[in-house]
Image: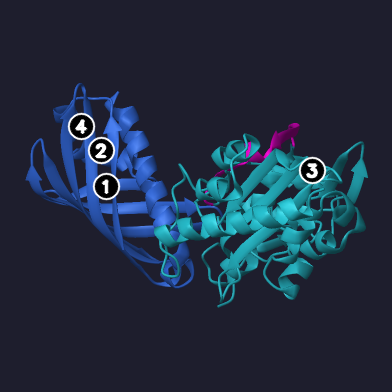
Amino acid sequence: MIPQEFEYTVPQSLDDTLKLLHSGDRKILAGGMSLIPLMKLRLASPEEVVDIGRLPGLNHITETGGTVKIGATATHHDIETSPVIRAKVPLLAEAAARIGDVQVRNMGTIGGSTAHADPAADYPASLLALEAQIRLASANGERTIPAADFFLEAFTTALEPGELIVEIQVPVEESNEGYRYEKVPHPASGFAVVGVAARVKKTKNKITLARIGVTGMSPRPFRARKAESLLESGATIEAAAAAVADGEEPNSDLYASAAYRQHLAKVYAQRALTTALSRSS
Amino acid sequence: MKISGTHTLPAAQDHVYNLLLDPVVLARCMPGCESLDPIAENEYAMRLKMVLASVSGLFDGKVRVADTNPPASFRLIVEGSGKIGFMKGDGLLNLSSVDTQTTVRFDGDVQIGGTIAAVGQRLVDATAKMLIKRFFERLSAEAA
């Protein structure tokens, strides 16, 4: 199908964008990898589409003072190949490389993906494990909130009407950290049936820091805090991985039942943690 | 697709039962419900606007209450169709008292078809659970 008729606007500045967003039935278009298919199916029919894909100043990737700042319209390809990301927050590059396919990665943006908050998206597990912050702007000002407070439910985020993601801020991973993003891709769509992002730091073979983000398993991505504390208090990776899904409601669909997803989360958490540990020094 | 769960409400069982059978309350609790107009005994015409992220769809249909057994149980049948697809939910609600609170247990079947089913199958479970949760949250607020 083709989309229903809509107005198409290309604002020339962030301010103009925010003024437009302040009212009306307007959807932001960045890479279009989520919005356009929905519009073609007529599942989404916004009256106006506001294209920020070429808005200057929104696709930077820089590091200042221990924080990597990623503009909202940086593409998955930008992130996957950026020397700054690969040196400073390599877990995110590993996650970006697993998204969809080459064509999707060339167009899709981190801001768009994060705002869309598909329960099976790849970034959220890493954003949680990396304890990233999301910077939001509106006509009324800006605010920054932790990723942990941003993803609320399936497709539901803390974005208020009129707000736009402008930047994702990620603390630099330390050089002795080990990391790994493991994912079970759906064989047709490539979406994460389950995805686990793990970071570990060790001192003399004892794990001193563990961060585990899980996507795909539940309606919203989550930090496996119980598994993290188990690891930090000396438990084995097996024991921690077995607790990774505790307390979270798993999704169920034709491809994977709730029980299967829980099982996958444990197996893939174990794999991610094992690799992350072997990469740490 | 089978769906079931329990929710506890801070109110007496009789009160909760009456609220559940009141179309004005039901209309306020069902997420996106714009109107529930009586067309027959225990049967209402429904207009519902479902919004989930960028996806929004208008559904026209019916809500029917059956097998009423106050204050213990009843059957709720919701069906609607629109441009983005159609849906039908048929559930049995069982109420029981725990101190001054009421536990509502529901067991039902949800079917969807059309475009939302073709592309959204992986989300049906999560969406249904989310809508049911919102329903009970609003019902809790009504009961207070």
Q: Nearer the viewer, residue A160 or B58?
A: A160
Query: How many angstroms separate mark 2 from mark 1 (CA)?
Result: 7 Å
The kind of residue tagged 3 is Val
**Same chain letter for marks 2 and 1:** yes
Mark 4–mark 2 CB contact (< 8 Å)? no
In this rendering, which labeled residue sits more in front, label 4 or label 1? 4
Residue at the location (13% across, 46% down)?
B74
Mark 4–mark 1 CB contact (< 8 Å)? no
Sequence-wise, the earlier of marks 2 and 1 is: 2
Residue beneath disc 3: A170
Kindly state the secondary structure of the residue where label 4 is placed: helix
User: Quadrant location of the N terminus of chain A?
Assistant: bottom right
Q: Give the chain of mark 2.
A: B
Tint applied to chain A in the drawing: cyan
Q: Which mark is residue B24?
A: 2
Query: How many angstroms separate mark 4 from mark 2 (CA)?
Result: 14 Å
Horizontal relation, residue A281 to residue A237: left or right: right
Q: Nearer the viewer, residue A18 or A214?
A: A214
Residue at the location (27% across, 27% down)?
B143
In this rendering, which labeled residue sits more in front, label 3 or label 1? 3
Residue beneath disc 4: B16
Where residue A3 appears, x then y in whole percent?
59, 71
Rendered image coloring scheme: by chain
Sequence-wise, the earlier of marks 4 and 1 is: 4
Asked which quadrant contains residue A143, the reply is top right
In this rendering, which labeled residue sits more in front, label 4 or label 2? 4
